[in-house]
Amino acid sequence: MLCTLALTLCTIAAAETLEFTPENFVLIENKPRLIIGLYENPEDDAVLAEAADAGFNFVRAKSDQASLDRLHRHGVYAWIPLGGNLALKPGGDAGLEKLAGIVNDFKNHPALLSWEAPDESLWNQWYCAHSWIFSEQPRQLAEKIASTSDPETAAKQKAALDRAVDLTRRGLWQQSEEVYDALWKEFGMEPQKPDLKMTRRVEAAGELCEELNRGWELVRQLDKDHVLWQNHAPRNSIAGMRAYNRLVDAAGCDIYPVPANYKVGHSDLPDKSLTSVGAYTDRMRDAAPGRACWMVLQGFGWRDIQEGAAYEEDAQLGRRPTWQETRFMAYNSLLHGANAVLYWGTAYIEKDSNLWRYLLRLARELRALEPAIVAPKPAHGPVAAADETYASFDGGQPLLMFRKYAGPGGGDEYALIALNECYAGIAFDVAGLPPELEGRQLYRLYSEETVTVRDGGFRDGIQGYDVHVYATSKKLQAE
């Protein structure tokens, strides 16, 4: 088998190499494209057609011909999650053959755009141990201590358990494990679940990293045309993620902050609000420098996937995102440098719900704006200066994205996106627009308002957590 595979690798036909723009938008049929994706692959053809018609162009597929054929008929591209098949252990001939078979079976399908690594690979190497380390192990030992008949011995055991818990909470993994191990042995047992020790998880994360990169090397040898993609959790260090991203073409994370409060806890940054989406986009770009950034956003409410008395007590806790929140999060990621927005959780919402309609509406808006979003970034763009206001706000807003793009008639058109990351409304001045716009009227899309460029700029105001799109043409406005 190894000889056959080696021959296969040496005789692969020269393929057109995957390409991206300087801004890291993938080129599809030689055109830069904004990826708008769905983790859900709707079983109902009418729902899939509705999503495709709205502008979704990327859907998760099974690794089978029928799934890819169906997506191709609807005019959308697919990604195939490789899951654990991507992790090639040293000397694992069977795993190598299976991965090569999957890639060779589907790499030439016209619907295929990307291969995906196991979801949240790095985080799951840590998370799999959390319940045991922080809950189950202390509980089991506490139960054994409770059955100790001698009060003095029980007190010493309780003190040791408290010490182990404290060391764990302080991140002193090895010291806490030594105390736990001694307690288990005192009860005549070997230390339980040694593979879930935090010190072991550090090693396991490194081992999986090498296994995945070994798999990516094989995938890239067999297939030069498709995106290699890793989605992370909103966790882990930049350095740790960089190792996992070493061979990928696109990386990002999922982040679901609505409603913005500490109970949701999906963001573990100090910022728990909507703007954590932009903050994580920055982290993902740092974790994969020079590569595309694909962000996974919220297509559900937390109460759609979780149960608990707290949800019954508080109607707002776990609610679904509003239209304003849905729109803001997408633009927040794009203005921080994302090249794709994908939505997880739509399988848990009704297809006549407000949130589903919001997502379709947003897809239409972004697809209409695509020519500007994927256009080259200018060497020097305009700047914004905000007025003083009552909030804890020191300026620097709104964020701007300015692009020149070719209009339908071939002439130059311009678009400017302004995004306010402050909860308070702000008045602001834009300066530094190019001379070609002097005296021209800019439409504020999805409103009846216009602004006129004077002395290289204009003045406007924007609500908190809002987005304005200004353009020289209303053709960027979806119907």
Image (tube, grey):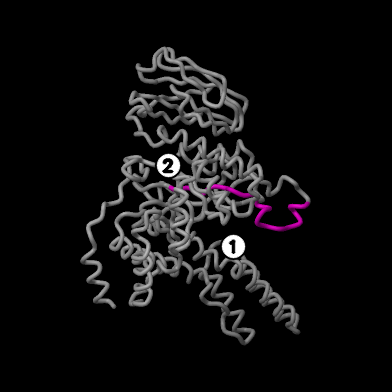
Quick one: 204 or 82, which is closer to the camera?
82
Q: Please state the horizontal and vertical placement of residue 17, each as a whole percent of the image.
A: 27, 52
Asked if the stretch drawn in magenta spans residue 353, the answer is: no
Q: Tell me: 216 left or right of 342.
A: left
Please give the label number shown on residue 169: 1
Q: Tell me: 136 left or right of 108.
A: right
Residue 51 visible here: yes
Mark in front: 1 vs 2: 2
Mark 1 to mark 2: distance in Å? 43 Å
Asked if the stretch drawn in magenta spans residue 295, the answer is: yes
Q: Quadrant of residue 193?
A: bottom right
Please give the label number shown on residue 34: 2
Q: Is residue 171 above or below residue 155?
A: above
Q: Quadrant of the N terminus?
A: bottom left
Q: Which residues are magenta?
A: 294-312
Q: First in sequence: mark 1 or mark 2?
A: 2
Q: Secondary structure at mark 2?
A: loop
Q: Residue shown at 34%/59% (left/top)?
A: 108
Q: Tell me: 54 left or right of 291.
A: right
Residue 122 visible here: no
Q: Is residue 146 above or below residue 46?
A: below
Q: Residue shown at 45%/65% (left/top)?
A: 83
Q: Residue shown at 65%/71% (left/top)?
A: 138
Q: Tell me: 289 left or right of 450.
A: left
Q: Please state the horizontal and vertical placement of residue 363, each as a whole percent of the image.
A: 52, 40
Quick one: 303 or 476, which is closer to the camera?
476
Q: Please state the horizontal and vertical placement of residue 202, each as a whole percent of the image.
A: 46, 67
Q: Please state the horizontal and vertical placement of residue 393, each as a whole percent of the image.
A: 56, 30
